[in-house]
């Protein structure tokens, strides 16, 4: 007796699947050898006719299986489904990349200082809540182009925090390492403008500048936090989680990040 049903699941690698009979929830085992059209691969949702037989162990299985929809039409239908899936997958990827881009470049609240074991409060008790985002650091050069300290000077004048800045200064004071939470190497720079700047360099995540001395010149790129004494620059290191733009220090031609 012939029955009609639909392939509800199919394992291409192992060459078997199950047929669901029209109007019932029961599933019947079917092997690739039971299909009359050997050139065509079965797929989920293919409509087939079949007979019910027994295998060597006495278990029910489909036999003399034939496709109801012609091969050309079935392939076309499946191609349409593939196109539809691909289109929705592409839309999904666009949405995901949009979210990732927003999280990477959106301003972050100063309280949520993401360095391991530290917070902005550990470095300075006086921080502005204003946020701003600046792109790639300007070229650090004394000849033409951008002034190396212009972003820092502007941020200090406008009481701004959470800004990526770069610049160059001379070490005027070496401070003891801050080992409360994540360890930080701390020193004060004086910029060409006369502004002083505290550098808090996370030495749990980046290499310490062991050879640093007062009077040395240091270039920097990191996140600025305002305070009345001139401000603080931290995040002068890479982010192992990749969620924050990486910073660095440069001393005697060597990068510390």
Image (cartoon, rainbow, N blue to C red):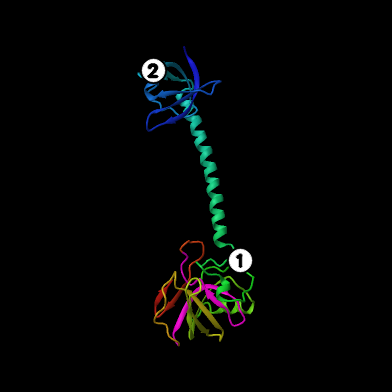
Q: Which residue occupies the foreground of this view, 223 or 52? A: 52
Q: Which residues are magenta?
A: 215-239
Q: Is residue 228 magenta?
A: yes
Q: Residues within 10 Å of mark 1 (few under 14, many from 20)?
A: some
At 37% across and 33% down in the image, what residue appears? 13
State the separation of the CA atoms marked 2 and 1.
Answer: 69 Å
At 52% across and 73% down in the image, what residue appears? 234
Q: Which residue occupies the foreground of this view, 146 or 134? A: 134
Q: Is residue 181 magenta?
A: no
Disc ID at residue 146? none
Rendering coords of residue 91 (x, y %): 55, 46
Rendering coords of residue 122 (x, y %): 55, 73
- For label 1, the SS is loop
Rendering coords of residue 2 (x, y %): 47, 14
Residue linked to disc 1: 109
Figure quadrant of residue 208: bottom left
At 45% across and 63% down in the image, what residue appears? 240
Residue positioned most to the left: 56
Side of 205 relative to 192 (left or right): left
Residue linked to disc 2: 58
Rendering coords of residue 16 (x, y %): 40, 27
Q: Is residue 74 above or below residue 106?
A: above
């Amino acid at each position: 007796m012939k029955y009609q049903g639909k392939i509800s699941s199919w394992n291409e690698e192992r060459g078997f699947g199950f047929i669901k009979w029209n109007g019932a929830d029961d599933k019947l085992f079917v092997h690739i050898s039971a299909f009359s059209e050997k050139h065509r691969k079965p797929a989920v949702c293919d409509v087939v006719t079949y007979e019910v037989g027994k295998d060597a162990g006495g278990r029910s299985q489909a036999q003399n299986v034939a496709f109801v929809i012609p091969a050309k039409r079935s392939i076309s239908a499946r191609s349409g489904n593939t196109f539809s899936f691909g289109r929705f997958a592409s839309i999904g990827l666009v949405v995901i990349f949009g979210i990732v881009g927003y999280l990477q470049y959106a301003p972050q609240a100063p309280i949520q200082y993401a360095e391991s074991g530290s917070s902005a409060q550990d470095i300075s008790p006086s921080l502005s809540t204003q946020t701003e985002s600046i792109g790639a650091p300007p070229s650090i050069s004394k000849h033409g182009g951008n002034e190396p300290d212009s972003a820092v000077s502007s941020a200090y004048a406008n009481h701004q925090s959470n800004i990526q800045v770069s610049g160059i200064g001379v070490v005027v004071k070496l401070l003891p390492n801050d080992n409360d939470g994540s360890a930080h190497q701390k020193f004060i720079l004086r910029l060409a403008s006369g502004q002083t700047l505290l550098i808090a360099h996370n030495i749990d995540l980046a290499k310490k500048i062991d050879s640093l001395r007062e009077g040395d010149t240091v270039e920097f790129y990191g996140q600025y936090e305002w305070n009345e004494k001139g401000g603080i620059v931290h995040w002068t290191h890479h982010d192992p989680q990749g969620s924050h733009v990486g910073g660095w220090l440069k001393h005697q031609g060597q990068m510390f990040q």
